[in-house]
Image: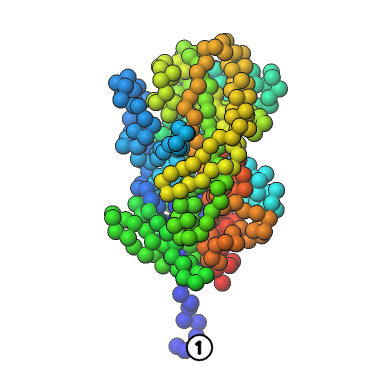
Amino acid sequence: MPGEAGATAAVKTAVVVGSGAGGAAVARELQGRFQVTVLEAGGEFRPFPVSLAAAERIKRTGLLVDERLIRPLYPAMQIRKTREGLVLVNGVGTGGTTTVSTGNALRLDAGVRAIGVDLDREYAEVAHEVPITAAHERLWREPTRELFRACAELDLRPRAMPKMGRYDRCANCGRCVLGCRYGVKWDARAHLADALQRGATLLTRHRVERVVIEGDTATGVVARHCGLRRFFPANLVVLAAGGLATPVILERSRLACEPTLFVDPVLCVAARLPGARQSREMPMPFYVEGDGYIISPYFDYLSFFFTRSWRHPAQDIVSLMIKLADDAVGRVAGTRVDKLLTSADRRRLDEAASLCRRLLARIGIRPGDTFLGTLNAGHPGGMLPLTEREAGTLHHDRLPPNLYVADATLLPRSLGGPPILTVLALAKRVARAAAEQVGE
């Protein structure tokens, strides 16, 4: 009846682009205050279906001549190369890159804290929502234990890597980046499932091309599905398609980004060590921090399959990963990525590689017997970096008031380490800011 509480305002709609750490966290936070639709460019995630033994047989045929050939077998892993040969890796599909990650949970917020963003509350909430543990030393094989002791002897202060998941059930198969078959490693599909249970909608294989902007307002997005374009109207749009895809969507929407791409380059220093079995061990079990990089034990599947120097059986290779905080110089233009390592980047990589050889020498490997892996990267971001002006709102001032970004694109500098925990916390804050601004 007129005048009674029966007439309620229509629920506002939100489109979230991407279902990785940022998109899933935003969808989980917004659903209820908004009717959320998540648009994911890829399909449902499926683990890599081939056993390592079978993959080694394929490798011996000599047919694996380019890293991009992994895509037909593992659609969740997208590979592209820069003109300089840097191999870029990201996840495509439900859960985004979290499904092809090693599940690390480092708090790396120095960059956003320096501009005035305090994420203490959000980190605390993530710690309650996501199981995190560093109690997994029982899974370490002897070469890993020896490397840990070598780091301690050199006063490098090694620390067990905090991991997202239920590692009391870990089978130590070493396939984290190929998709956990046992439901041990946490990935963003858990947050996505929460959002769907609360009423959100997920549409896979919907690749968003651009945001539609009328005046100073985002009215929705245009996505392509099965060759057809469709407009999705929304009161709120949140882009969380990742550090390589979000900038492309913004620039197609006539919203300029900055040539400040970082990617966290990875280089492995490896050697033959009979019976090491690192390929059958949880990757990145501990880490040490250097000047702009971290070092961690890591069996690199990309290098093993596609780098000729990694010719030994997988079980006989031991490897240390260098993950670098690179200078923010580069950009994405459509399908092309322009990214050069600076002289400072190269210097830090060389210093870290020398340290890796020293560590391997302490477990009996001569420096001259080591070999390098494929230079690759998987943590892109930084092309719409937050500044002190946006510290309070987390809304970049060149965007329409109802358009937000909630992934590593916002980070003001390279983390030089695993970004998932930081992206989850940042996306939570973005979702709250967006709800306050647009949800009223």
Which residue is the site of mark 1? 3
Residue 140: % across, % down: 54, 23
The front one of 142 and 398 is: 398
Q: Residues within 10 Å of mark 1 (few under 14, many from 20)?
A: few
Tag 1: amino acid: Gly
Image quadrant holding the N terminus, namely: bottom left
Q: Is residue 435 left or right of residue 207?
A: right
| Residue at (49, 38) in percent of width and height | 378
The front one of 340 and 427 is: 340
- Location of residue 96 by image quarter: top left
Seen in the picture, residue 87 relative to 257 is either above or below; the reply is above
The front one of 338 and 146 is: 338
Image quadrant holding the C terminus, namely: bottom right
Residue 371: % across, % down: 50, 18
The front one of 399 and 231 is: 399
Secondary element type, mark 1: loop
* Colouring rule applied to residues: rainbow
Q: Is residue 246 left or right of residue 228?
A: right
